[in-house]
Structures are given as C-alpha cells and as structure tokens.
Amino acid sequence: MIILLLSMLEGNVLNGPIGKQMVDTLIESQSNVELLLQFIDIFLKMKGLTTSEAFQEFDANKDGFISPKEFRRAMEAQKMFTNQDIDYILMCVDVNQDGKIDFMEF
C-alpha cells in the first residue's frame, strides 16, 4: 500500500502490478467514499517520502522488517497522521498478516 502511494507520487505507476493494484484499490474504494477519501488524504501526506529511504527510516533496528511498534513510532514522528490513519495503514500494509512489514509489503 505504501509503495503504491509512493509510486504514484514518484510517477512510476504506468503499467504492471503497481498500476493494477492502484486501480483495484480505487475500484474497491468506490463503494466506500470514506475509505477513498482516507486513501487520498494519506497519499497527499506522504508526498515527501521515497520508498527505500522511508523503509530504512521506519526499520529502526535494521532487521529488514518493520514491526507495528516501529511503524507507529515513525508515523507519529511525522505529526501528520491520526491514530486512526496509522491503524488503517497498518491493516492494509501487513498483507500476509505475519505481524511485521517487509519491503515488498511496504
């Protein structure tokens, strides 16, 4: 999800899996206006990040994964996201639901 947002910001969404994921996310959100507005709000807040830099910043212990605690701490430090935003992003990002975020999920 975060890679999707960052790729959109970096202009890397033309074709392929990221473009498909973006379209799928927006189509799924179509029936839920609140979800779509939240997606757009988070997208705009993340304008200054790049994918690899953000992952390295979030992975405080440098183990190659971002724990929910590391993720929450990094997001809170930006002072742009509500707890509800952070919970929503965490829910979306941990695709395999293993309790941590790897680079591909990020």
Image (cartoon, rainbow, N blue to C red):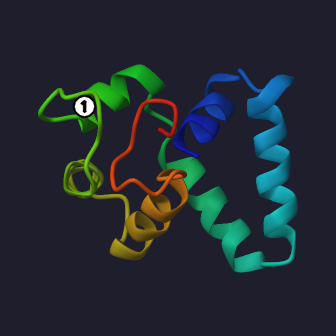
Q: In this view, does 65 lie above or below 34?
A: above
For the point 30% across and 53% down, which residue is it? 75
For the point 58% across and 60% down, which residue is it? 41
Can you tell which quarter of the image residue 84 is in? bottom left
Query: Which element type, helix, strand or loop, lies under badge 1?
Result: helix
Observer-nearest residue: 43 or 104?
A: 104
Measured as percent of width and height from the top left, residue 39 is found at 64, 60
For the point 49% across and 50% down, which residue is it? 45
Can you tell which quarter of the image residue 52 is in? top left
Observer-nearest residue: 52 or 65?
A: 65
Residue bearing the label numbered 1: 57
Instruction: Tell me if mark 1 has few (under 14), some (14-19) or many (20+) residues whose alpha carbon lies within 10 angstroms of its own.
Output: some
For the point 63% across and 29% down, which residue is it? 7
Q: In this view, does 45 lie above or below 50?
A: below
Observer-nearest residue: 65 or 37?
A: 65
Identify which amino acid the numbered label 1 is placed on.
Glu
Residue 24 falls left or right of residue 53 = right
Measured as percent of width and height from the top left, residue 3 is found at 56, 35
Residue 65 falls left or right of residue 90 = left
Residue 3 visible (yes or no) = yes
Q: Is residue 56 above or below residue 23?
A: above
Q: Is residue 61 above or below residue 84?
A: above
**Count of all numbered marks drawn on residues in the image:** 1
Can you tell which quarter of the image residue 53 is in? top left
Residue 14 visible (yes or no) = no
Measured as percent of width and height from the top left, residue 30 is found at 86, 69
Residue 30 falls left or right of residue 18 = right
Measured as percent of width and height from the top left, residue 92 is found at 55, 59
